[in-house]
Image (tube, rainbow, N blue to C red):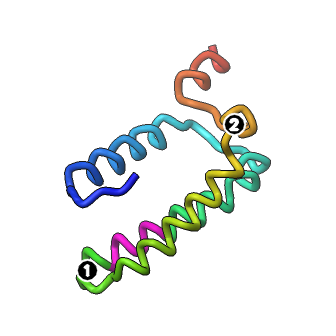
Amino acid sequence: MATMHDTEARDVIHHTAMQLAALEFIDRHAAKDLSQMAEAVANLFVVVFYQAETGRATRSDFREAMTAVRQALQQYAEPSKCQGVISEKEADKAWS
């Protein structure tokens, strides 16, 4: 998804943060499985932080980071492949 509008970027990041906040725990197996994706997303956020602090991130920096995210996404096309990720709701059920 390409965006030039900061409201779109804000919505995407806010939505992602809300989904992450709903996670109760990620076990080691899931963390290993998700490590490439997590690294790609972290690198993308480094570009965002760099742009916020300096205004000097280039389109090439962003494009490179997005390419890594897209490549990682291809490996996780099926959400069911991610084992061991527990939402807050699922954790509540497990503990009751």
**Residue at image coords 42%, 80%:** 60
Circle 1 — which element?
helix
Per the rendered image, the range of residues in magenta is: 44-50
Circle 2 — which element?
loop
**Residue tagged 1:** 53
Q: Quadrant of the C terminus?
A: top right
**Residue at image coords 34%, 79%:** 50
Quarter of the view holding residue 70 = bottom right
The amino acid sitting under disc 2 is: Glu
Mark 1 or mark 2, which is nearer the start of the sequence?
1
Query: Could you give the CA–CA distance between mark 2 and mark 1, rounded to whole angstroms?
Result: 36 Å
Mark 2, Cα crowd under 10 Å, few <14 / some 14-19 / many 20+, is few
**Residue tagged 2:** 78
Counting every numbered tag in the picture gives 2
Q: Is residue 72 left or right of residue 32?
A: left
The verdict on residue 14 being magenta is no
Q: Main secondary structure of the magenta part?
A: helix
Q: Looking at the image, is mark 2 or mark 1 nearer the viewer?
A: 2
**Residue at image coords 36%, 41%:** 15
**Residue at image coords 72%, 44%:** 27
Quarter of the view holding residue 6 = bottom left
Q: Residue 67's spot in the image, x, y percent?
A: 55, 67
The amino acid sitting under disc 1 is: Glu
Give above or below for 23 relative to 7.
above
Q: Is residue 80 left or right of residue 51?
A: right
Q: Residue 83's spot in the image, x, y percent?
A: 75, 37
Q: Residue furthest front?
A: 2
Task: Name the one closer to the observer, 74 or 43.
Answer: 74
Is mark 2 in CB contact (under 8 Å) with mark 1?
no
